[in-house]
Amino acid sequence: MTSLVSYDDSDSEPDVWKTEIPNGSNQGKSLDCPTTFQTKHFSADELDPGKPYKQKSITNIGDICPDSVNEDSKPFPVTYSSKVSLDTCSGSTSPYLCYKSQGQSLDSLLKSVTVPANVQKRVHEDHVFPAVGIKPYIPKRMRQEQPSALKNLTKDGEKQKQPPDSTIKPVKGEEHLSSMTFRVSETIKPYLEAKYKATEISRSLVFQMCEHQGPVNKVQWCPVQQYSHMLLSASMDKSFKVWDAVDTGSCLKTYLCHSGAVRDVQWSSCGRVVLSGGFDSMLYLTDIETGKPLFSSENEFKISTLKFHPTDRNVFVCGGFSPSIRAWDIRDCKVIKIYKAAVQQTLDILFLPEGKEFFSSTDSVSRDSADRTIIAWDFQTTARISNQIFHERYTCPCLTLHPKDSTFVAQTNGNYMALFSTQWPYKINKKKRYEEHKVEGFAVGCEFSPDGSLLATGSSEGRVFLYNYNTSRVVRNFPAHNQACVNVSFHPVLPSLFATSDWSGEIKIWQ
C-alpha cells in the first residue's frame, strides 16, 4: 500500500502541491483549553529578564477582569476573555494532532487528495498503514507559541511513558491550583444565597499558618463572595501569598516579584488580579493564576498604602514616604493626578463609597495639635477639602469605613479609635471612643464586621479586641498571638470567621 508521509525536513523544500481538507472549520482558530498551574515562586528576573524596571501596561483591566461582581452575581466562567493570550495549554493534543476534529476519517481524507500526474512525490512502501504513527507538520510559529502541547511528545509523536517506579507527588496545595479562582468552597456555598446574619463572636482557633518569614502587614479576604475562601497576605519577607483559609489552611501560591518588603496588597474587584507595593518602590498588578505582572512600574518613593478607586477599577492611588499621593491609570501606565501636602509620610488612604473624595492619614503632628493628621481630598480636582479634622496629638496608622452608616474610624497611637462623620465638615464624635487596647507605635489595623455591628482591632500585646459599634464597649478580648497583632479581617460571607496576623509572620483563622 502506498501512503503519504510528512518529513521533518519538508519545510526546506518548495511546496509543490497542497492538500485541501474539507470541513476544516476549526483551522485558523486559537485553541481554547483550560490552563493548569503548578506551585511556583515567581521572581522579577524570571518575569522580565534584563529589564527589571521596564514599565508594562495593559489596555484595560476589564480585559482581565469581567464587570464588577455584586452579591447576586453568578460565578465567573472558567475561561479568560478572548483578548487575553494564554502562553501555555494543559492539553497535550492540538488541532494539528487530531484528524477526527476535522470531521472526516483519515481514509476519506486520503481519497480526497488529488495529485497532478506530472508531480513527483515521495512514497513509502508499507503493507500496514499505522495512522497513529504519522507526525503531521507543525509550523514553527505554532511550536513556539504552544510549547507545552509538544513537550510530552517523542520524535514519533507518541507520549512519553514514566518509568514504573517513578512517582510525581504534588506540592502541598497544588491540587487547588487549577481551580484556584473558579472553585466554590463547600463551606461557603450554603451562605451565598442567604442574607448575611448577625456576626457571631469567634471563640476557637481553626488554622494556624506560619509560612511567612517576616511580619505580616496585611491580610484581606477575596471580595468576590464565591471565591472568598482565598486569603491574601503581604509580608516584610518580600513576598505575598494566597491561602485557602476556609477549607485546608494551605498556601496556594507564593509571589516573589518584589525585591523589598511588601507593605500593602489589594484585591481587584473581580478577584483575579492583585495590586501590590512595597519598600522597593515597585508597583505590580499580578495575575494570581499565572503569576505574571499585567502592570508594573517604578514609583518615586517607598510605598506604604494602596487603594483601588471604588468606581473606576483602572485607577488606584498610592502613598508612602513622600509629601505627595499619586493616582495611577493602569491603561496608560502613567500618573494622572498628584495630591501634595506639607507632610513627610502617608500612613493610610480611605475612599468614600462614590469615589469623589478620599481621606489620607499622615505623620504630621505639631506641638499643640495634630494639624494635617487626617486630610480630606477632592479626587478630581486634587484640592484639599479639609485638614482640620483631627485635633489631638496622635498619628493614625489605619482608617476604616463603616459598611452602612456615614461614619469612619481612625486608629490612633493614643491607644484608642476615634469615630468621624463622612459628611462635611467630617466632625469627630466626642461621645464615642473605642479604647482599652494598646498600639504603641505599631501599624495596628482595624475593621468593621460586614453587618457593621462589631469593630475589631489588634493590639501591641498580641490580643484581639471586639467592640460593640453602638455602645463602644468591649464585647470580648482574648490573647491571639505572642507578638503584636497588627491586622484583623472579617470574612465577607461566613458570619463567625475572621483572620488575624502578627509581627512574627503568623496568620490565624478564628471561628
Image (cartoon, grey):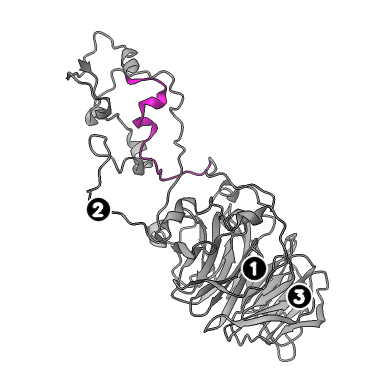
Residue 134 appears in the rendering: yes
Dot 2 falls on a residue whose secondary structure is loop
Marks 2/1 in contact by CB < 8 Å: the verdict is no
Question: Seen from this angle, which residue lies furthest bottom?
Answer: 367
Distance from label 2 to label 1 (Cα)? 45 Å
Amino acid on which disc 3 is placed: Tyr
In the rendered image, residue 353, in percent from the top left (x then y), is placed at 74, 61
Magenta portion: prevailing SS class: loop
Q: Quadrant of residue 476?
A: bottom right
Viewer-proximal residue among 443 and 120: 443
Magenta run includes residue 197: no
Where is mark 3, residue-wise? 469
- Earlier sequence position, callout 2 versus callout 1: 2
- Report the disc number at residue 185: none
In the rendered image, residue 217, in percent from the top left (x then y), is placed at 54, 74
Amino acid on which disc 2 is placed: Ser
Amino acid on which disc 1 is placed: Ser
Quarter in which the N terminus is drawn: top left
Distance from label 1 to label 3 (Cα)? 17 Å
Where is mark 1, residue-wise? 496
In the rendered image, residue 264, in percent from the top left (x then y), is placed at 56, 69
Mark 2 Cα within 10 Å, few/some/many (few <14, many 20+)?
Answer: few
Q: Quadrant of residue 212?
A: bottom left
Where is mark 2, residue-wise? 166
Q: Which residues are magenta?
A: 83-106
Dot 3 falls on a residue whose secondary structure is loop
In the rendered image, residue 158, in percent from the top left (x then y), is placed at 26, 36
